[in-house]
Amino acid sequence: MFRLARFLKHYKAQSVFGPLFKLTEAVFELLVPVVMARMIDVGVKNGDKAYIYHSGIILVILGILGLTASLTAQYFAARASTGFGTELRNALFKHINSLSFKEIDKFGTPSLVTRMTNDCDQVQTGVNMILRLFLRSPFIVLGAVIMGLTISVKLTLIFLVASPVLALIIFSIIKKTVVLYKTTQKKLDRASTLTRETLTGARVIRAFSLQQDEISEFEQNSNDLYINQLIAGKISALMNPFTYIVVNLAIIAIIWCGGKSVDTGFITQGEVIALVNYMNQILLALVALANLIVIITKAQASAVRVNEVFDTLTTISDGEGASSDDTDIAVEFKDVSFSYYSSSDDALENISFKVKKGETVGIIGATGSGKSTLVNLIPRFYDVSSGEVIVNGADVRRYTLKSLRERIGIVPQKAVLFKGTIRENMLWRDKNATDEQIEKALEISQSLDFVKEKQGYLDAKILQGGKNLSGGQRQRLTIARALVGEPDILILDDSSSALDLATDSHLRKAIRESTDGMTVFIVSQRISSVRNADKILVLDDGRLAGTGTHTELAESCEVYKEICRSQGIETNEGGLS
């Protein structure tokens, strides 16, 4: 929690005034039993109505002043905590966006969402309660003991015995619940994961009629969460009975001993009542402190999870900057190996090849052979485990990320469009692109015809995730988005899987004819998509099984031959039959 205090730096005044006004309220609260004691000992004892009315007015004034101080304190605490929460979320979101895919894979998307939402809320609540109660409760306990000592040292010894017993009970119960609260956060993570998987995969789940299985799994996790929270609740529920037993025994002792002291004339009846009130104030303060500790415990568990994200630094940082060398080699892999986070097996192993500027390179292989992994190393979404990836004569690790990725247009496997207009989506690569440049990219990607049919043309609305478009339309628009700004390198990662063969053919022809000088990587599982490429890389279980043209590979590469046969393309010693 203290490590996150830096997000309060813009709310120092509120962080000071909040506790100060809460202490002021506590002072007014501690004065109430004194006034009541005087009211009984003077006003009631002597039948002095004027004194009683006067004391009553003072009590009302103390109440109003205490309420005003309390509301002011809560206002400052709320301002500070909400500002803290806002800055924390902004900083966490910014930090998450600085992480590479490796770190994001480490945490998992559902866990990061939970940390951004639930955990930040818990920490914000903890800050709010600390500013309101952290100083007030100990001050009330200490103040009540001191005020009791001014009345009767002997009777105040009861306070000094009861208070540690109360504290022991409270903190013993809290200690038992700390572990349970941490487990609860993990269960919430799992609930978030299940919810996300069920919503994103709803069509698949229903296609296989597995709704009941998903419901059962979610119910199991929810029941575990329920049981965990129930146990914590039962333990916490012991607090009130135990504390009230101790307090009531202390009050009985005060009244018993106080009665004897009144008989002997050591103290007055009003002072006994004041001691009873102070005992109740101690109880309420300790119970409030206990609740505060529960909240702080939850906040601390959440703060640990938030700090875990902040403590995870990206393994991919900007290079010192590199300028392109005068070379005709656009991309070169030198003995590249790569493995994913927490995996002992290499996803790519000893990959070496060169691609000249302006060449079209096809990458083909079985599912899981490392095709997407390979192209993800070019824009440096991941860093290699060993070897070098060189773009325009310089290691990608020497470039700043911005300058490297400005050279590269990327179309990922999953076509992702954002809520807004077609024009807004097209301007992601180049914010200054003209409508003519956008139209050219749309024409190359075979999107112009259906975009013209949209009401509003380039200003036509796209729903979140492009849900108002077909899969093929989404893929073509993502290709157009990558082409805007004319990148040096274009990466198409299985980006035509939803296109029919005719449209796919027209697309490849348009890219070949309209992107003069652009180096193009086409990742596909279709032979038809890569057969006309200048060079084809054949991957097999993370290794480079062959490199060459379609004809060369059809003669020499067994893996490529097998892929051809699986797609109904027969080969013989002379190539295609």
Image: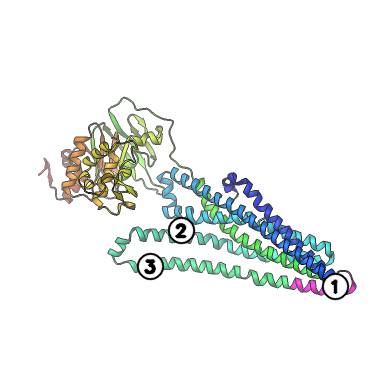
Hey, what amino acid is under mark 2? Asp
Q: Do the residues labelled 3 and 2 touch (CB within 8 Å)?
A: no
Secondary structure of the residue carrying tag 3 is helix
Q: Earlier in the sequence, mark 3 or mark 2?
A: 2
Q: What residue lies at 42% left-to-right and 52% top-to-bottom?
A: 109
Q: What residue lies at 64% left-to-right and 52% top-to-bottom?
A: 18
Secondary structure of the residue carrying tag 2 is helix
Nearest to the eye among marks 1 and 3: give it: 1
Q: How many residues crowd mark 2 within 10 Å: few (<14), some (14–19), many (20+)?
A: many
Relative to residue 315, is residue 325 drawn left or right?
left
**Residue that carries the numbered disc 2 in the rendered image:** 189
**Residue that carries the numbered disc 1 in the rendered image:** 45
Q: Position of residue 120 (x, y in %)?
A: 52, 53
| Viewer can see residue 30 | yes
Q: What residue lies at 41% left-to-right and 58% top-to-bottom?
A: 193
Secondary structure of the residue carrying tag 1 is helix
Q: What residue lies at 36% left-to-right and 60% top-to-bottom?
A: 199
